[in-house]
Image (spheres, rainbow, N blue to C red):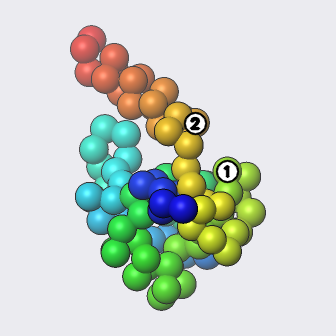
């Protein structure tokens, strides 16, 4: 089975984990910071793997339940919220 391109993650409770700009950005292009209160989509990369091994990121499914495998953490292509937020920011900039 092929590894996914993107996975869903959270940070441990009470922690904030900045993500490398090649692995994920906030809508609008700002630095993505993963926290323990929101599921985020990041690219599965060497940097993400190291963050997971250090305990800075936790693989999870869409409802935030931790999972043990990368395959179970695969992020859907239409990850909720990201497109809507990016579109809203783009429209706001057009005004």
Residue nearest the observer in this picture, 19 or 71: 71
Label 1, secondary structure: give it.
loop
Please name the residue shown 56% across and 55% down the image.
74
The circle on residue 80 is 2
The circle on residue 62 is 1
Report which quarter residue 31 is drawn in.
Answer: bottom left
Residue 18 shows up from this direction: no
| Quarter of the N terminus within the rendering | bottom right
Residues packed near mark 2 inside 10 Å, few (<14), some (14 to 19) or many (20 plus): few
Residue 84 shows up from this direction: yes
Q: Position of residue 76 (x, y in %)?
A: 56, 43
Earlier in the chain: of badge 2 and badge 1, it is 1
Q: Are marks 2 and 1 in contact (CB under 8 Å)?
A: yes
12 over 79 or under it: above or below: below
Q: Position of residue 54 (x, y in %)?
A: 48, 88
32 over 17 or under it: above or below: above
Q: Position of residue 5 (x, y in %)?
A: 42, 55
10 sits to left or right of 83: right
Q: CA distance from mark 2 to mark 1?
A: 9 Å
């Amino acid at each position: 089975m092929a590894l996914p391109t993107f996975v869903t993650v959270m940070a441990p409770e009470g922690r904030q984990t900045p993500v490398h700009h090649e692995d994920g950005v906030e809508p609008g292009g700002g630095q993505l910071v993963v926290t323990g209160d929101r599921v985020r989509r990041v690219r599965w990369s060497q940097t993400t793997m190291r963050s997971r091994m250090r305990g800075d990121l936790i693989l999870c499914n869409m409802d935030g339940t931790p999972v043990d495998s990368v395959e179970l953490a695969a992020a859907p292509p239409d990850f909720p919220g990201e497109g809507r937020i990016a579109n809203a920011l783009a429209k706001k900039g057009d005004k």
